[in-house]
Image (cartoon, grey):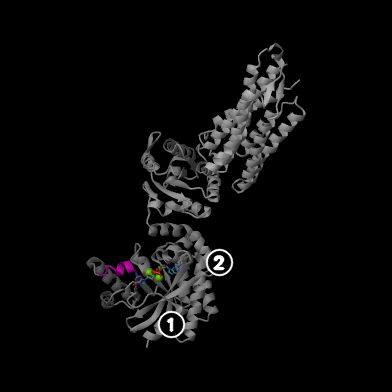
């Protein structure tokens, strides 16, 4: 007598699993849909199995006509053999390779061929009884072609396992194992049932293996952000790894609520999460066919298939309009500042890390106020800029590792001596991919990522070394100007560091002039003043760089023991503007009166040169005389011009 409890338990478990899947908020995605199909199919199969067995036990004795039993058995075979096909589609979905299936007719044929064979066998059975039949005593009997069904199942077995091994890299190890296990579980079930037919364990074990899949592969906490109701940052990173591994073409929309920190302060954590949830709901409304992710802290992403993208442009604009500007939230009207960007993978980013760093930093250098940047529409120069900014941290750390920074020197002309008596040391970085990188850009990035102190030491070491070689070669340069970053200015041991390099290269302190920016000079931190004083006491002088760019606090500048003030190029360029001209004249005479020397930066023409010479400026620096030069060219320049 057959034991029906296994089938009954299977029905119970699968019911729970279906309800569970329904309750999941992300049930709309394809992976879940196909899993739901599998569950329903397994449920139908188990019902057919149970029904036919129950029928055999209870009603067979009264039966004269086996039509209904045929119906039950056909139902069972059609649905039972459909599971491996659905499972294979599920494998395509979890490995994010569905696009390969959609594109390739060969794949489609291989996928459905075994099931078509099953259908052909079952149809032929109606006429030939070549798979199974009920004999004269109405006993279920297998025919010769029955094993054709096993062969079809075996095809899916081989297909599925080889597929999983091929794409194992896109799955974490636990997911991979639980998917692979689906096959031995089912094989085991078939064997048990073949040798101990009274144990109807096939559908039970089938359900158990699906249960494992649902718990490990579809792990909810990894997939969904429970507070916001869309996929989490973990899901984003796993999905994106797959995209890059499989070179799957996708378009990604990223949205950053730029004023998220302010909203968090005003609303508090819970209400702010509610607000993010409302934005997520808007995304669900507008982007029905794409995957949605919440990457924490007001950052959202949505991935589209590339083919369907062009029609999505208008939808993206409408979505933007719906969240931008004032946003009703409870009784409040909140001002939402957002920055959106759409890019393509793998066209715009050749690897996962670059894409991720872009996603987390794009808003710091793309326009906000609801602006949407379509990377594909940007010109090459703009794209170069994005990529450079995105990769700058990596470029800097690689340059430090490979010691690839170089120092250039720009000669500075002394009006009084009518020759070049000083020079400014300017750092240069050449990258294989991006070429020369503007120092403004990488110095700022180095200040943000913390490598500026290391770069500062590299600069000091290189420049002091060069000064000592110039001294040995008797090059007539009195002092070299070295730029200090704000972060260096507030170092407690700045004096010791400078002294270390002076000693290392046997230099006199007067040979070095340190440039600090207006921001550093204006900082309220006493440490800057202490450093300047301490270094001045040992003979190292200071210059104030970029005069005229910040909010010049003249009284603060005057109070600092500086030797030189450098007028910034932005002011130099406007010297013929009457107002700026008056300000410059006034500043120069004031600064000179208190004993400071003036360097004019960015002088490119003779007119400008004459104008500043007339004002009484002491030094001129600019392309009019020379651009910054590599060491050898600089030495040659000085030898040639300082006769
Ligand atoms: P800065 O210290 O104000 O340097 C002057 C900048 O003006 C240099 O740009 C120089 O090449 C440029 N310049 C000089 N004369 C002319 C001219 O006639 N026309 C034009 N168009 N430009 C001229 P550079 O080398 O690109 O450096 C930019 C900034 O990067 C520097 O501004 C400085 O703030 C920073 N920097 C450069 N080297 C270092 C360094 O070793 N350490 C630190 N902390 N900052 C550095
Ligand atoms: Mg400078
Ligand atoms: Mg400057």
- The crowding category of the residue bearing disc 2, from other C-alpha atoms within 10 Å (few below 14, some 14 to 19, many at least 20), is few
- Quadrant of the image occupied by residue 598: bottom left
Which residue is denoted by mark 1 in the rendering? 635
Q: Nearer the viewer, residue 177 or 486?
A: 177
Q: CA distance from mark 1 to mark 2?
A: 28 Å
Residue 568 falls inside the magenta stretch: yes
Q: Which residue is mark 2?
A: 401
Assign the N terminus to one quadrant of the image. Answer: top right
Question: Is residue 431 shown above or below 145?
Answer: below
- Residue 420 on image: x %, y %: 37, 82
Q: Position of residue 262 (x, y in %)?
A: 43, 45
Vertical order, 73 against 539 (above or below): above
Q: Is residue 467 left or right of residue 314?
A: right
Residue 354 shows in the view: yes
Who's the residue at 38% across and 65% down the image? Answer: 518
User: Between 375 and 437, which is closer to the camera in this rendering?
Assistant: 375
Residue 565: mark in rendering: none
> Is the CB–ligand 1 distance for label 2 below 8 Å?
no
**Start and end of the magenta stretch?**
566-575
Residue, far bottom: 643
């Amino acid at each position: 007598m057959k034991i029906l409890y296994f089938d009954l338990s299977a029905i119970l478990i699968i019911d729970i699993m279906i309800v569970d899947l329904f309750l999941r908020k992300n049930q709309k995605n394809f992976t879940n849909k196909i899993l739901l199909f599998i569950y329903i199919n397994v449920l139908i199969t188990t019902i057919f199995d149970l029904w036919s067995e129950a029928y055999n036990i209870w009603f067979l004795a009264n039966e004269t006509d086996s039509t209904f039993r045929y119906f039950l058995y056909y139902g069972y075979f059609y649905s039972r053999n459909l599971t491996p096909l659905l499972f294979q589609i599920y494998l395509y979905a979890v490995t994010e390779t569905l696009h390969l299936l959609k594109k390739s007719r060969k794949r489609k044929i291989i996928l459905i061929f075994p099931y078509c064979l099953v259908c052909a066998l079952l149809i032929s059975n109606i006429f030939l009884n070549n798979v199974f039949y009920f004999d004269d005593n109405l006993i279920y009997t297998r025919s010769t072609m029955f094993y054709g069904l096993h062969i079809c199942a075996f095809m899916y077995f081989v297909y599925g396992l080889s597929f999983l091994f091929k794409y194992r890299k896109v799955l974490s190890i636990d997911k991979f194992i639980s998917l692979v296990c689906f096959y031995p579980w089912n094989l085991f079930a078939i064997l048990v049932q073949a040798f101990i037919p009274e144990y109807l364990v096939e559908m039970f074990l089938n359900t158990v293996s699906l249960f494992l899949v649902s718990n490990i592969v579809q792990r909810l906490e990894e997939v969904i952000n429970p507070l916001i109701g869309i996929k989490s940052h973990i899901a984003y990173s796993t999905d994106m790894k797959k995209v890059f591994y499989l070179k799957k073409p996708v378009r990604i929309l990223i949205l950053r609520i730029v004023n998220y920190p302010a909203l968090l302060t005003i609303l508090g954590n819970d209400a702010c999460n509610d607000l993010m949830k409302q934005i997520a709901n808007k995304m669900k409304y507008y982007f029905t066919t794409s995957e949605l992710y919440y990457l924490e802290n007001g950052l959202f992403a949505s991935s589209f298939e590339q083919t369907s993208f062009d029609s999505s442009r208008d939808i993206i604009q409408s979505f933007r309009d719906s969240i931008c500007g004032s946003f009703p939230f409870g009784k409040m009207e909140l001002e939402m500042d957002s920055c959106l960007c759409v890019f393509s993978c793998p066209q715009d980013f050749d690897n996962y890390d670059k894409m991720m760093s872009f996603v987390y930093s794009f808003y710091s250098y793309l326009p906000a106020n609801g602006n949407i940047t379509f990377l594909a529409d940007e010109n090459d120069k703009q794209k170069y800029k994005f990529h450079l900014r995105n990769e700058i941290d990596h470029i800097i750390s690689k340059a430090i590792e490979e010691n690839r920074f170089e120092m250039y020197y720009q000669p500075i002309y002394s009006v009084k001596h009518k020759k070049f008596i000083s020079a400014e040391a300017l750092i240069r970085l050449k990258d294989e991919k991006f070429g020369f990188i503007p120092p403004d850009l990488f110095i700022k990035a180095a200040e943000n990522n913390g490598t500026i102190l290391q770069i500062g030491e590299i600069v000091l070491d290189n420049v002091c070394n060069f000064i000592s070689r110039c001294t040995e070669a008797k090059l007539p340069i009195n002092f070299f100007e070295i730029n200090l970053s704000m972060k260096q200015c507030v170092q407690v041991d700045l004096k010791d560091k400078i002294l270390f390099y002076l000693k290392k290269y046997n230099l006199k302190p007067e040979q070095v002039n340190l440039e600090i920016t207006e921001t550093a000079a204006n900082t309220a931190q006493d440490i800057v003043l202490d450093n300047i004083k301490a270094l001045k006491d040992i003979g190292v002088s200071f210059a104030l760089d970029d005069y005229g760019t910040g909010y010049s606090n003249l009284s603060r500048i005057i109070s600092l023991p500086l030797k030189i003030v450098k007028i910034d190029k932005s002011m130099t360029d406007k010297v013929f503007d009457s107002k700026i001209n008056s300000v410059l004249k006034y500043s120069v005479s004031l600064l000179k009166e208190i004993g400071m020397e003036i360097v004019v930066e960015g002088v490119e023409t003779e007119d400008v040169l004459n104008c500043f010479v007339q004002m009484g400026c002491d030094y001129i620096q600019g392309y009019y005389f020379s651009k910054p030069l590599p060491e050898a060219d600089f030495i040659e320049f000085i030898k040639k011009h300082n006769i």
